[in-house]
């Protein structure tokens, strides 16, 4: 059955989404129905380019724009779900939807034949770097970016690069490309709208938490561990977590427990099973009666056959685990089992909250310490992640309310409450990766000198935020007064990046003329997404060895910056 009616949020947006070609930014809570708004713009675009039905602009004929639709999802898991959702709805119209991610390699012909490509930011960045007239990037007429609030994340720089490249291409080729941004509720949505070139009067829609389809009760629990002993604190958190889980199960609800490491999913499930066994509640609450439970019997054989021993073991206790390190089939099996109610408790990592739409009545975040390999220490779980996970509580089709609980240490609790009440604007992370993205533009031929590079930087979210919050980006008040568009600061950043790339032999930078010329190193780095730090390492190590052996080359590869966070197994 299709959608018979639109909810209030979708009705508000309908006219702008379906009857205009305006760029849109829609900020609404998780579960408010943003994907259906994306579907409205998809159908509207297919109609306007003459692929389905009568064009809205009947007398003018099809619109002069690319026919292809590109949907950028933040994760591969979500891309897969969007493909399934869009395919099932558009199959009858003969529309082909394909996934273009690291998991699914498409041939050139397959990618060109597809009407809708669902991809990740990094993959689309690589595709558009290899520009040119007949390229995939130039055939795109509608670009939908899901979870735009990822701009605040490390990966946000990629979205900035992709959008800046698109805006410049639109201006130089004079072809219209419609841009749709979907995002959770943001404090500084107007800045994001400026960056996406959205007309604030016609295309900007903001819906507050009252538009959640299911009201949410939020609980914050601070564990007071007077000892510095991590294990005692963990044990206390497991005790608290078990109390909430067992209470939800008694009321007949399903529970999702979010932890912050892949190993933590298994250890949490074990801890819950042990406590349930001690209290004699494992059979009654977690597993349920065999007789009445046909759903469980349906999955017994598939769960026993899985090669993942942990999955099989936890399934016997009525629980499941889910993280990115599991095989795709095992992840799908776990999702299906939870969806059908064959397992009552799912221990998972935050990827599940960003990815698959798999809500539960009760959601628990156990602990807020996330290990950051770059810093070599634990940091606080970001408030964006907390909001995203909380958004998974309450299933719109079944529940009238949802419960979300955050279990953290006592001192961190105050920080989270403060962040939730006074939401902080999302900032740009572009400066850290400026050199790599600038190199890609030089290779693509869109930046040939320092002045063009400064112009390119003005299309990024970094420039929008630098003008709004200069102090955060190293700009003093006096500098802002004398240079309100911050051209001077942009020049400093660009020149610094150009010198770095020149030193690493990726770009030839002429300081007199300001010209930038591409080198083979730079071209390879851009096309294969290699960081400039890795190129510097390769240069240095190859320079020391006049005729490297195969073993030397393997060693040089392993020293690449991309592998720095991968720990090797001993023995």
Image (tube, rainbow, N blue to C red):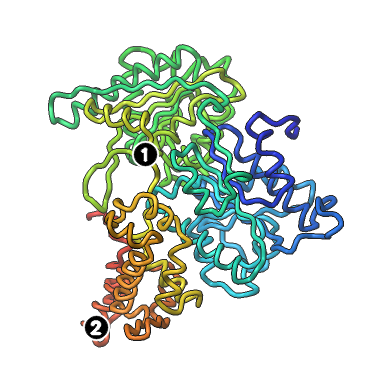
Q: Secondary structure at mark 1?
A: loop
| Residue 26 lies in quadrant | top right
Kindly identify the residue that appears in the image at 34 percent across and 33 percent down.
419
- Front one among 376 and 553: 376
- Front one among 83 and 56: 56
- Position of 315 with respect to 552 (left or right) is right
Dot placed on the residue nearer the N-terminal end, 2 or 1: 1
- Which x, y percent locates residue 521? 38, 79
Can the viewer see residue 531 in this picture? no
Kindly identify the residue that appears in the image at 59 percent across and 67 percent down.
171
* Farthest-out residue, front: 482
Q: Is residue 71 above or below residue 267?
A: below
* Foreground tag (2 vs 1): 1
Q: Is residue 397 above or below residue 265?
A: above
Q: Which residue is mark 2?
A: 543
- Position of 336 with respect to 245 (left or right) is right
- Position of 298 with respect to 269 (left or right) is right
Q: Which residue is mark 1?
A: 424
Q: Count neighbours of disc 1 (C-alpha within 10 A) and say few if under 14, some if 14 to 19, many if 20 or more.
A: few
């Amino acid at each position: 059955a299709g959608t018979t009616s639109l909810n209030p949020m979708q009705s508000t947006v309908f006219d702008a989404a379906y009857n205009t070609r305006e760029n849109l930014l829609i900020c609404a809570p998780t579960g408010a129905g943003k994907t259906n708004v994306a579907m409205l713009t998809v159908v509207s675009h297919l109609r306007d380019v003459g692929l389905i039905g009568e064009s809205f602009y009947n007398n003018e004929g099809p619109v002069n724009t690319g026919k292809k639709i590109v949907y950028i999802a933040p994760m591969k898991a979500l891309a897969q779900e969007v493909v399934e959702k869009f395919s099932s709805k558009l199959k009858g119209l003969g529309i082909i939807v394909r996934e273009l991610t690291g998991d699914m390699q498409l041939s050139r012909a397959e990618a060109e034949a597809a009407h809708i490509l669902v991809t990740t930011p990094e993959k689309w960045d690589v595709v558009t770097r290899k520009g040119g007239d007949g390229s995939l990037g130039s055939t795109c007429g509608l670009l939908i970016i899901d979870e735009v609030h990822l701009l605040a994340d490390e990966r946000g720089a990629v979205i900035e690069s992709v959008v800046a490249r698109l805006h410049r291409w639109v201006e130089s080729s004079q072809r219209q490309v419609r841009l749709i941004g979907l995002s959770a509720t943001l404090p500084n949505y107007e800045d994001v709208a400026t960056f996406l070139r959205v007309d604030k009067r016609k295309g900007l829609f903001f819906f507050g938490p009252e538009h959640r389809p299911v009201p949410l009760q939020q609980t914050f629990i601070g564990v007071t561990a007077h000892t510095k002993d991590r294990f005692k604190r963990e044990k206390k958190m497991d005790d608290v977590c078990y109390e909430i889980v067992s209470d939800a199960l008694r009321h007949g609800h399903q529970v999702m427990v979010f932890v912050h490491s892949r190993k933590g999913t298994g250890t949490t499930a074990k801890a819950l099973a042990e406590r349930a066994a001690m209290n004699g509640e494992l059979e009654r609450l977690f597993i349920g009666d065999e007789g009445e439970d046909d759903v469980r019997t349906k999955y017994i054989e598939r769960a026993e056959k899985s090669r993942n021993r942990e999955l099989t073991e936890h399934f016997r206790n009525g629980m499941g685990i889910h993280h990115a390190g599991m095989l795709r089939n095992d992840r799908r099996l776990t999702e299906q089992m939870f969806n059908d109610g064959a397992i009552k408790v799912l221990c998972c990592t935050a990827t599940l909250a960003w990815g698959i739409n798999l809500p539960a009545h009760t959601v628990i975040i156990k602990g807020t310490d996330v290990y950051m390999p770059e810093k070599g220490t634990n940091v606080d779980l970001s408030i964006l992640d907390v909001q995203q996970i909380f958004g998974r509580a309450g299933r719109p089709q079944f529940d009238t309310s949802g419960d979300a609980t955050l279990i953290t240490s006592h001192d961190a609790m105050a920080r989270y409450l403060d962040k939730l009440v006074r939401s902080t604007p999302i900032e740009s992370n572009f400066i850290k990766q400026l050199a790599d993205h600038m190199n890609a533009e030089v290779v693509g031929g869109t930046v040939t000198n320092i002045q063009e590079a400064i112009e390119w930087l003005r299309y990024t979210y970094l420039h929008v935020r630098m003008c709004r919050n200069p102090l955060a980006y190293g700009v003093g008040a006096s500098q802002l007064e004398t240079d309100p568009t911050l051209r001077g600061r942009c020049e400093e950043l660009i020149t610094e990046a150009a010198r770095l790339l020149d030193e690493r032999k990726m770009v030839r930078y002429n300081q007199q003329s300001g010209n930038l010329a591409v080198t083979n190193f730079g071209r390879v780095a851009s096309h294969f997404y290699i960081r400039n730090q890795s190129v510097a390492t390769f240069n240095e190590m190859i320079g020391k060895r006049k005729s490297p052996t195969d073993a030397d080359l393997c060693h040089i590869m392993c020293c690449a910056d991309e592998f720095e966070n991968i720990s090797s197994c001993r023995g």
